[in-house]
Image: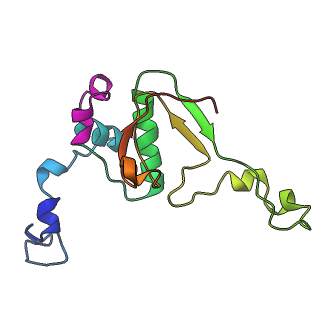
Amino acid sequence: MLELGKGKLPNYDLNGEEDPTWIRIPNRFLIAPGNFPIEQIVMSTYPNIQDNYRDVDFLNDRCILAPTNDCAEEINSYIIRLLEGDCHDYFSCDTLSPITTSMDDEDVIFPTEFLNTLQLSGMPNHKFQLKIGSPVILLRNLNQSAGLCNGTRLIVTQLGKG
């Protein structure tokens, strides 16, 4: 990734012609074609994850970048299923804060089913699953003086009842 960022990767198109709009991805970063690409991505990035997911050094050198939030959600769900322990489901709030006192029929305008489908950048989806020992990434600054800022990688050590 550093070579890519510095512009040091060779740029050739499919015919072998030099082309600055193409980037050749080194073979060590490619997965073999197969029926379960998410499984291949997870297993190549986190080999023996069931034995190593509580090891900070193991997690520190690895991450999966996903092109979309939907893809990230699918990968996260797959990894959560692999980890031992009970899965805890957390749900978003399914009511609106009243904007005005004259809006009595906000349930009709914004039904709960609609609110639960919203997917907002920087916010977890309506259903959020966690297990103790799960690695997570902090999305919002909580306490910068304690090092808790965007992108901080953490491990879940306890879960409250939701």
| Front residue of this view, candidates 64 and 98 | 98
**Residue drawn at x 65%, y 46% as measured from the top left:** 92
**Residue drawn at x 43%, y 41% as measured from the top left:** 76
Picture colour scheme? rainbow
**Residue drawn at x 50%, y 58% as measured from the top left:** 122
Q: Is residue 45 above or below residue 111?
A: above
Relative to 7, is 51 on the left or the right?
right
- Residue 10 location, quadrant: bottom left
Instruction: Give residue 158's position: percent from left, percent from top.
Output: 49, 27
Examine the rendering and report whether any part of residue 24 can be seen. no
Instruction: Give residue 49's position: percent from left, percent from top.
Output: 29, 29
| Front residue of this view, candidates 73 and 26 | 73
Quadrant that contains the C terminus: top right
- Residue 25 location, quadrant: bottom left
Whether residue 51 is in magenta: the answer is yes
Instruction: Give residue 154's position: percent from left, percent from top.
Output: 37, 40
| Front residue of this view, candidates 155 and 129 | 155
Relative to 14, is 136 on the left or the right?
right
Relative to 49, is 150 on the left or the right?
right
The furthest residue to the front: 145
Q: Is residue 6 above or below residue 59?
A: below
- Span of residues in magenta: 45-61
Quadrant that contains the N terminus: bottom left
Instruction: Give residue 119's position: percent from left, percent from top.
Output: 58, 57
Whether residue 120 is in magenta: the answer is no
Relative to 24, is 107 on the left or the right?
right
Q: Count the numbered circles shown.
A: 0
| Front residue of this view, candidates 143 and 101 | 143
Examine the rendering and report whether any part of residue 97 can be seen. yes
**Residue drawn at x 28%, y 39% as measured from the top left:** 40
